[in-house]
Amino acid sequence: MLILIAGITGMVGQPCSEATISQSHQTELSRGVDAVICAYGFLPEVSVEGQLMLLRATERAGVKIFHTASWNYDWTLGYLGQHEAYDPYLAFHTQVRISSRIKPLFMFTGRIAEWLFSNRRDKIWDRETQTLPCFWICTTASDIAAYTLEAICAPGADEGGFIRVESFRFTPTQFVEAYERARSGKVSAHLKYQGSVDDVVEMLKRARETIHPVNLEEYIG
Ligand SMILES: NC(=O)c1ccc[n+]([C@@H]2O[C@H](COP(=O)([O-])OP(=O)(O)OC[C@H]3O[C@@H](n4cnc5c(N)ncnc54)[C@H](OP(=O)(O)O)[C@@H]3O)[C@@H](O)[C@H]2O)c1
């Protein structure tokens, strides 16, 4: 199978390319591909406009299997305007449904495990206070690559749809125990109550009043 991976240098693109090559598929950036994996990053203009252009080019080339940049929590549970981080995915999905014959694949993975401790802009792992907000569903980057490859190679991949996968899930207590175990007891971790759901709703309301949505990465995490 000849697979085009757009965004191949990224956090998801790289393991997808490794899985593709190790399964003896070919990765190509030219004509004649059988399937497209779009691994563009999180920016709204890339995940909506960039991805739409790629999808149109895919359709013109007669390719029917298109795996979208997704690998998120399940945003089908929400609605447009509810959560800035997921609006681009909902917008893309809505637009494609009424304007293209391609039926894309979307994958829901919870958090990417490696992302939790990565030093990315939205600072999920806060190095100063050494705190981590809790996420209960996780998928590792290598599992994401394997699931994605399996999805595009499966019979009916051109029928698209939503795929829900995970590597593991944990409670905050289990997370603390696992962290201490992994550090052989040399580091102690603590659970810290940071507020209620109502507090979070209030924080989000304040952030939306004071921060321009273009800077959504400052608050949405
Ligand atoms: N659930 C989670 O915890 C989680 C965490 C991370 C990501 N994700 C999701 O996974 C997907 C991929 O994210 P990622 O973190 O792998 O992205 P990333 O590491 O930021 O990689 C972005 C890729 O997109 C390319 N790109 C960026 N801007 C572009 C543009 N204007 N035109 C064309 N290509 C462009 C980059 O190419 P260059 O190298 O040329 O810049 C790079 O190859 C996204 O849908 C994201 O939301 C989910």
Image (tube, rainbow, N blue to C red):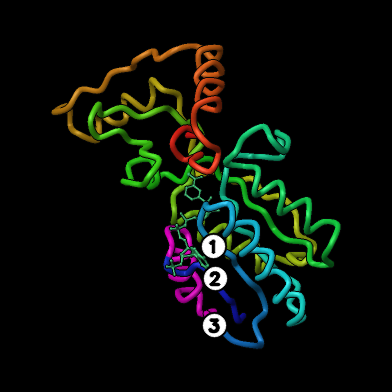
Q: Are marks 2 and 1 in contact (CB under 8 Å)?
A: yes
Label 2: few (<14), some (14–19) or many (≥20) C-alpha neighbours in 10 Å? some
Residue highlighted by disc 2: 6
Q: Percent from the top left, x then y, of residue 28?
A: 54, 82
Q: Which residues are magenta?
A: 10-28
Q: Which mark is residue 39?
A: 1
Judge whether 195 appears above or below 8 on screen. Answer: above
Q: Residue at x 52, y 79 (%)?
A: 27
Disc number for residue 28: 3
* Horizontal arrangement in the rendering, residue 103 relative to residue 219 (left or right): right
Q: Is mark 2 within 8 Å of ligand 1?
A: yes
Type of the residue with mark 3 = Glu
Q: Residue at x 70, y 33 (%)?
A: 78
Q: Say which residue appears at 66% left-offset and 49% top-offset.
A: 89
Callout 3–callout 2 Cβ contact below 8 Å: no
Quarter residue 164 falls in: top right
Instruction: Depth check: give the residue in front, 198 or 218.
Output: 218
Tell me which numbered mark, 3 or 1, is placed earlier along the sequence: 3
Whole-percent x, y for residue 105 in the image: 70, 58
181 or 119, which lies in front? 119
